[in-house]
Amino acid sequence: MSILICRTFAIALILASTPSTCVHAASPAGVSPLEVSLPSGEPSGNSINDRLRLAFYPAIRSAERPAPAVVLLHALGERHLRLMRRFARYLAGHGIAGAVMTLPYHMSRCPPGERPGGRFTHPDVDRMVQALSQSAADVSTAVTWLTRQPGVDPHRIGAVGISLGAIIVHLAMGEDERLTAGVAIMGGGNLADLRRTSLVFKLRRDYAAEPLSPGEEARLRQADPLHYADRNRPRRVLMIQAARDLIIPPRDALVLWEALGRPPIQWVDTNHFALGLTPRSVMAASAAYLYSVWREAPLAPGAVPTIRVPTLKTGLVFGLDAAATPAIEWQAYSFSRRHDHLSRLHADLGWSGRGPFVGLAATLNAYLDIGLGHRLGGDNMRPYASLHIVF
């Protein structure tokens, strides 16, 4: 707590003594954001990285004055902010102001010669910890700025993040008690396990497979959302996770969910990136959850809309009048879910190398289904197996 008080006090002094740079930018959706430049809450020593950028979208059509507000945090390696700006415009249109924050080492904050966001997956644990810690401090800087805006309710400020942004949401909520609500989309904790198993680390050319030393484990723990999970309870955060996620393995989301006291969680039967196919569904659920917290209304069944995301598969189909053929499938309807949140039994529509087909299949694991299907122009129902990956 003393660390938070000192950090908040320091941020307040910086903001009071250093003027922010603001320019208005046009928005095609009718919401004109305010572009803000602030000093970082925890400087890295690099002048390019240490200027915090916000795009602030004031709430419109709000029945409440002042309005609640959120800090919106993007995914790893982001090169533009189209999705987060769209998210902010949606929330603004539903009465919630939004400040889209550029995370350290991304876009305008990326030093020359570095790849966007590379510090967050760096083999050097100290560089990774610095990037995470600076990100959480910058969220606190953004919160301090929001509390000073005349149209914002300082007691109703939250955070919404996607992927890396969701990890920062969990971390920032553990460190800054002024964040009273959050939505974490495809995030998680247990960073040491993420470094060992996440595809985003394994795809680095300089990936180090050897285990971390005890000292490295201890330093990484200081930037892990798990380290702060027992603070700020009850944890008012909606978690949205993918059952087939290769970037944030489901077990690393579950261990954080347990540590947070099992807050509300929605699972979708997809991989890490599929939510981009139906972003409006995620936005609607996020807005509903945030309002349910700030209005202190009980979360009755149906209070938060169920997120609808298509499960799309690509791979090989064996059977259906052919030994093996490439296929694309849409898992059109699920009849039940397994304990690991994959669909147990589902109806599929597909297109194979021999034409369209329909099927009724059971999930054996994340990569294999078996069932009965009928190919257009084929003979009767025939058994088939689908070996695939999911978008």
Image (cartoon, helix red, strand yellow):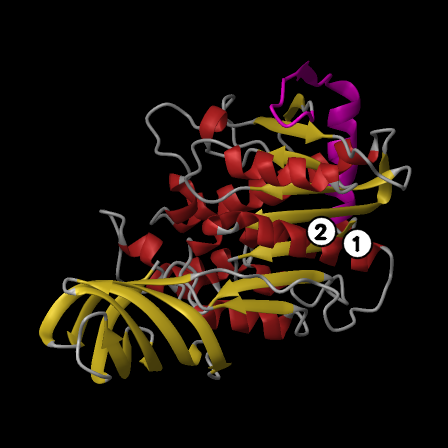
Of 80 and 391, nearer the camera is: 391
User: Badge 2: few (under 14), some or many (20 or more) residues near its Cα, within 10 Å?
Assistant: many
Q: Where is residue 63 shown, x and y percent of the image?
A: 89, 41
Answer with the quarter of the image where residue 391 lies. Answer: bottom left
Q: Where is residue 213 shown, x and y percent of the image?
A: 37, 63
Judge whether residue 286 can be spotted in this image.
Answer: yes
Judge left or right: residue 319 versus residue 85: left
Judge left or right: residue 327 versus residue 289: left
Q: Where is residue 238 shown, x and y percent of the image?
A: 66, 61
Report how far apart the C-alphas of labels 2 and 1 lie in the structure.
6 Å
Q: Where is residue 89 shown, x and y percent of the image?
A: 66, 35
What kind of residue is marked 2?
Ala
Of 343 and 125, nearer the camera is: 343
Dot 2 and dot 1 residues touching (CB under 8 Å): yes
Asked whether residue 16 is drawn in magenta, I would say: yes
State the residue position of label 2.
287
What kind of residue is marked 1?
Tyr
Residue positioned 72% across, 64% down in the render? 235
The residue range painted magenta reads 3-31
